[in-house]
Image (cartoon, coloured by chain):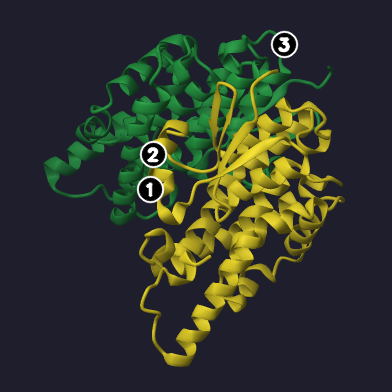
Chain colours: A yellow, B green
Amino acid sequence: MMMGKMKVYADRMSQPSRAVLIFCRFNRIDFEEIKVDISKRHHLSPQFKEVNPLQKVPAIVHGSLNLSESHAILVYLASAFPGIADHWYPSDLFTRAKIHSVMDWHHSNLRHGAVNYVINTVLGPATGHPLNPKAAAEADKILSSSLSKLESIWLNGDGRFLLGFSQPSIADLSMVCELMQLEVLDEKDRSRILSPYQKVLRWIEDTRTATNPHFEEVHNILYRAKKKFEQQRSRIAETGTEPRNKMEGHSKM
Amino acid sequence: MMMGKMKVYADRMSQPSRAVLIFCRFNRIDFEEIKVDISKRHHLSPQFKEVNPLQKVPAIVHGSLNLSESHAILVYLASAFPGIADHWYPSDLFTRAKIHSVMDWHHSNLRHGAVNYVINTVLGPATGHPLNPKAAAEADKILSSSLSKLESIWLNGDGRFLLGFSQPSIADLSMVCELMQLEVLDEKDRSRILSPYQKVLRWIEDTRTATNPHFEEVHNILYRAKKKFEQQRSRIAETGTEPRNKMEGHSKM
């Protein structure tokens, strides 16, 4: 197929963007990464609206195909590019059905809880959302309930990965990237949320190991954000005052 | 394949259950429908937990496969059963990718808005949720924004169905069933929500027509619920009092 190099529009601060980038790099897909900086509202630009009318990252352009939604993108990449190992998106009907099931579950459970918790505790000011403690408390409940189901149902198999598999699928990559955003939380809070779930913690490490060095390289921006937020929190703790510009921690990343 | 007859666990008051049932009936799939009455909390029974540990409908059992999440089920059915027309889940890679994209979008947008609006205005008491006007107002916003994107982006094509297609896909069936739950709202409120979106209204009718008589037969329970809620509302309007038992309207369906 002569379709030119695929373009991936992404902001590495967005967890579904990271999942798509790690997948492309790990699988040696030839692509061009185009940064869409959400903190600078570049996702709302008229240029990006031409690429994705929904104004969300990630999005890809591959020949005449414009595609958004990270799960749809991962399924497409695993299907369209040659030489991608079957475990990423198994061709067996039963196995593939289970992968779709856990990815569908993800939307209204793990993603819903994690995104709303992080936005309403740490990331809000950097993305133009006011912090909302009541919404944070509700998201906390959904996140904990989702982690409990992840531990007892989806990771309840012999293998190290979701559904008891011995190798990662696109579902592992998507959902581990989701949980990685908890890195920006206060360390005590992150530990309170994750430490009851030992299988989940091991699974995050296993997915990281299975996809390195790409996993760490693509997450570097998040680790830098984590440090900035830590410094901001310790400045507040020392001086008892908030930084003048709440976006300072984020905008320097 | 000798797998025995497929079992579909469903409550016809659940919109994703209805989508799966209509798909099976329209495509003459040989299956057994097993009612899981949510208003009687049968989805929380130990027996059903064996079928689906997530305790949600719909779920299917087909041979050794237990599967939940209506989108995953629809994809599986369209792939696993012989003789199902290609338009339901097209095999062309680009087209299939777009179907996945709109179905992924559905979760956090149209579904999120519609479910939370209906639960927090009408259905809550019948399913054990207290009404929450603030949550209803937030859901209303998400629903309206989703309908606007549905009208201007997803239905912005030459054809009558999503993505400009001339025949329905599993995405049309899933999303139209989602919107059908608005039938239980007060008629003025339903009209306020839907009437600005003429393409959406036409698309609901086109999907209904394309899948009849199964669409209407499977929705009958919803029309009966609609009548009960209407009667309840007019009793309240006449007497100025709420019925003694708030679940009355629902439990008699």
| Neighbourhood count class around disc 3 (C-alpha, 10 Å): few under 14, some 14–19, many 20 upward | few
Using the image as rendered, state which of residue B212 and residue A95 is in the foreground.
A95
Q: CA distance from mark 2 to mark 1?
A: 13 Å
Mark 2 or 1, which is nearer the eye? Answer: 2
Label 2 SS: helix
Looking at the rendered structure, the kind of residue marked 1 is: Gly
Can the viewer see residue B213? no
The chain that hosts pointer 1 is B
Residue depicted at x 82% and y 37%: A87
The vertical placement of B201 against A181, above or below, is: above
Looking at the rendered structure, the kind of residue marked 3 is: Pro
Q: Quadrant of residue A61?
A: top right
Using the image as rendered, state which of residue A253 and residue B92 is in the foreground.
A253
Circle number at residue B82? 3
Left or right placement of residue A68 versus residue B61 in this view: left
Residue depicted at x 66% and y 16%: B91
Using the image as rendered, state which of residue A232 and residue B237 is in the foreground.
A232
| Neighbourhood count class around disc 2 (C-alpha, 10 Å): few under 14, some 14–19, many 20 upward | many
Q: Are marks 3 and 1 on the same chain?
A: yes
Q: Quadrant of residue B248?
A: top left
Give how far across and how far down residue B212 sits, in percent. Answer: 45, 10
**Lower sequence index among marks 2 and 1:** 2
